[in-house]
Amino acid sequence: MSRTRSPLRRFLAAGLTVVATAAAALVATAVPAAAATVAGIDVSRYQGSINWTSVRNAGIEFAFIKATEGTSYKDPNFNANYTNAYYAGVIRGAYHFARPNISSGAVQANYLASNGGAWSADSRTLPAALDLEANPYSGGYCYGLSTTAMRNWVQDFLNTYRSRTGRYAVIYTTTSFWNQCTGSWTGPWGNHPLWLARWASTPGTLPAGAPFWSFWQYTSSGSVPGISGAVDRNYWNGDRSRLIALANNTA
């Protein structure tokens, strides 16, 4: 789900094991992948103009939509996607592509919260997601940060986002990236929903300490009416009522 669709990302993600989980208060049980029938997508400007009514009519119930990256990039299609998804009946949330080597976590969490990542209890707005994955730019796989520095950066982001919105952010990552770059840190999994990234037929091994996954991005080459070309496809680990509970923070 990086800003670019590079061959490097496809190579890395193809063998990546998955991220998992959600706050226990927000997900009733850990269910097998076969039972996760609530379908979703994630999109950015690379999907172009989207017919969200067609997307919803095709059975897509939720979407994560790119809002921001780093400290200065705003996805040019975010406003249209976020608004049109809502009116089509799609439960949607914003996501932020992390750049841990260019500012503090707090700066980027504030940037997200001020540019699309806010939250309201309207049954259709999910807490925003922190997209934390292998660095597609220069600076090394883990952005040049030690495991301690990466943990501190992530905690800074999560704390700031919660102080701004009252919600625990979703974390998108892979088992490989998380375990290597945070040193198999287990800290966030008690509260923060985990969004798995593994393009495969099963979720696979979860990050250290993660009890289960909440969202699972299982392919980058999905096809959905209303979207031209490939799109990331996802599952929610539960039924629609639990997804609405997550959106409304009522579980």
Image: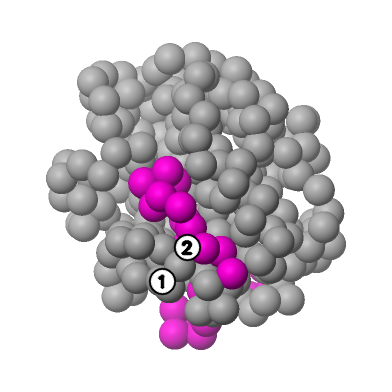
Q: Earlier in the sequence, mark 1 or mark 2?
A: 2
The segment highlighted magenta reads 24-53
- Residue 77 in sight here: yes
Q: Tag 2, which secondary structure?
A: strand
On screen, residue 150 versus residue 6, left or right, reads right
> Residue 161: x percent and y percent?
68, 33
Q: Quadrant of residue 30?
A: bottom right
> Residue 72: x percent and y percent?
50, 19
- Taking the spot 26% from the left edge, 19% from the top edge, the residue there is 139
The residue singled out by tag 1 in the image is 224
Mark 1 in CB contact with mark 2 (< 8 angstroms): yes
The residue singled out by tag 2 in the image is 41
Q: Amino acid at mark 1?
A: Val
> Residue 213: x percent and y percent?
51, 63
Please name whichever residue, 213 or 243, is drawn nearer the observer in this view of the structure. Answer: 243
Q: Amino acid at mark 2?
A: Ile
- Residue 15's label in the rendered image is none
Q: Nearer the viewer, mark 1 or mark 2?
A: 1
Q: Quadrant of residue 166?
A: top right
Question: Total of numbered circles in the picture?
Answer: 2
